[in-house]
Amino acid sequence: MDFKEMQKKLYKLGYSNNIKAEIEKEIKSIKADCQSLREYQAVVIDDMPHSTTINDTVGNTAVNIYEKRIAELMDKLEKQVIEKNKLLNLISELSIEEQNVLRAKYIDGLRWEYIPGKINICRTVCFEKHKKAVNKLIKMWDNKNTD
């Protein structure tokens, strides 16, 4: 993994709750669509009572497609949560100053001009801590993924 790839992973940390919420919202919507399909009652002209369950291949195919999409989204959500937790655990192994720089930048979403003032270090040290922390994370990430 290179520096830019790790930065992308770190930026995702700040948006991870939004990503999770979007996935959960889509799953909820698909489940509602599936439920309506399952309860769909075809209009029949003979005025006889009919079942409220799907008994046509088109409806069953649609439900199967929806259920497959839900499984894909659940898998994506699980992977996102695992990666987030893994990254947060790795960050917790860094020095306090390195953690503070990364959290301010990627989790709190602060711009570089505000970070030194927030964590009480000079701008130059802030950039040095950032570079050192990201490089450490790359090494730790690569070591954890080769085990």
Image: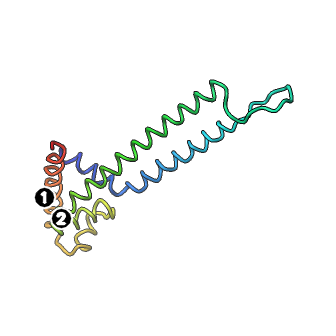
- Front residue of this view, candidates 114 and 108: 108
- Tell me the tag on residue 98: 2
Residue 84 in the image: above or below residue 98: above
- Crowding near the residue tagged with mark 1, few <14, some 14–19, many ≥20 C-alpha atoms within 10 Å: some
113 up-or-down from 49: above or below: below
The residue located at (52%, 50%) in the rendering is 25
* Residue 24: assigned label: none
117 to 59, vertically: above or below: below
Looking at the rendered structure, the secondary structure element under dot 2 is helix
Which quarter of the rendered picture does the N terminus lie within? top left
Question: Upstream in the sequence, badge 2 or badge 1?
Answer: 2
Residue 41 point in image, percent of width and height: 74, 34
Q: Which SS class for mark 1?
A: helix
- Give how far across and how far down residue 138 sits, in percent: 16, 50
Residue 132: which disc?
A: 1
**Residue 19: image location, x then y, percent:** 42, 51
The answer to whether the residues at label 2 and label 1 have Cβ atoms under 8 Å apart is yes
Q: Residue 14: name its quadrant.
A: bottom left
Residue found farthest to the right: 47
List x then y, in percent, for residue 60. Answer: 60, 29
Q: Is residue 101 left or right of residue 79?
A: left
**For the point 37% across and 54% down, which residue is it?**
16
The residue depicted at 15 percent of the width and 63 percent of the height is 129
Residue at 22% across, 47% down: 4
**How many residues crowd around disc 2 within 10 Å: few (fewer than 14), some, or many (20 or more)?**
many
Q: Is residue 14 left or right of residue 90?
A: right
Q: Quadrant of the C terminus?
A: top left
Q: Looking at the picture, which amino acid does disc 1 mark? A: Lys
